[in-house]
Image (cartoon, grey):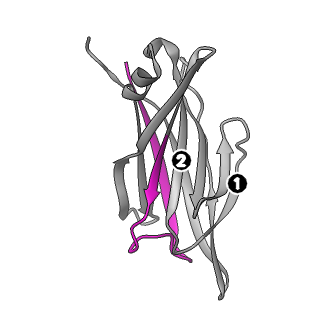
Amino acid sequence: MKRKKFLALLLVIPLMFLIFNGTNPKAFITFASGTPDAYGDCIYEGSVWQSSVMKGNVTYNNYTSGVQVKVDALTATTFNCTVKLNSTFASSTSEAISNTRVYLNITYTNGTVVVSSTEMTDYSATGPSGDQYTVYSYYLWNDPTHHPIAGTTYYVWFRYEVYR
């Protein structure tokens, strides 16, 4: 059976890293959302974690323009991404994982690449619930030369692909 790649949607998360005061550097994250495709495939949720603490969580249902989340600068940051996959494209959770790919890009505002088209890892899945599987993945941004830097703006893109 031949598989076709399908780009479900693209999310853009501008990351704006700012310093509040000289002793406690923080960063802000804003989240932008797309809409599900005709099959209901979509990026459902994005969350940001640092040191096992959830710094922010934005779902498809609660997204509003301008949402901001505080994160610490110069700290390893984990991006979790949850996607929905129509159950007609998989017959089990393992097949849902095999048929799903989520990629992450991080750039500076001038377009210089920090992380390029890196596939998110450690996929797991549940379902189906109703007509969809839920597939989870994450990316650990743990490059000491490119941790979130206070006063620097970053853009983060998630790309979700479904193999049918």
SS for callout 2 = strand
Q: Is residue 40 visible?
A: no
The quarter of the picture where residue 66 lies is bottom right
* Residue 13 higher or lower than 96, as above or below: below
* Residue 119 higher or lower than 66, as above or below: above
- Circle 1 residue: 66
Q: Is residue 152 visible?
A: yes
Residue 8 image offset from top left, x and y in percent: 47, 29
Residue visible at 73% across and 45% down in the picture: 64
Residue visible at 35% across and 61% down in the picture: 113
Depth check: give the residue in front, 34 or 88. 88
Depth check: give the residue in front, 72 or 155. 72
SS for callout 1 = loop
Number of labelled discs? 2
Residue 139 image offset from top left, x and y in percent: 45, 51
Badge 2 density bin: few <14, some 14–19, many ≥20, Cα 10 Å:
some
Three-letter code for the amino acid on which mark 2 is drawn: Asn
* Residue 5 higher or lower than 51, as above or below: above
- Circle 2 residue: 80
Range of residues picked out in magenta? 137-164
Residue visible at 51% across and 75% down in the picture: 74
Image quadrant where one finds the C terminus: top left
The quarter of the picture where residue 67 lies is bottom right
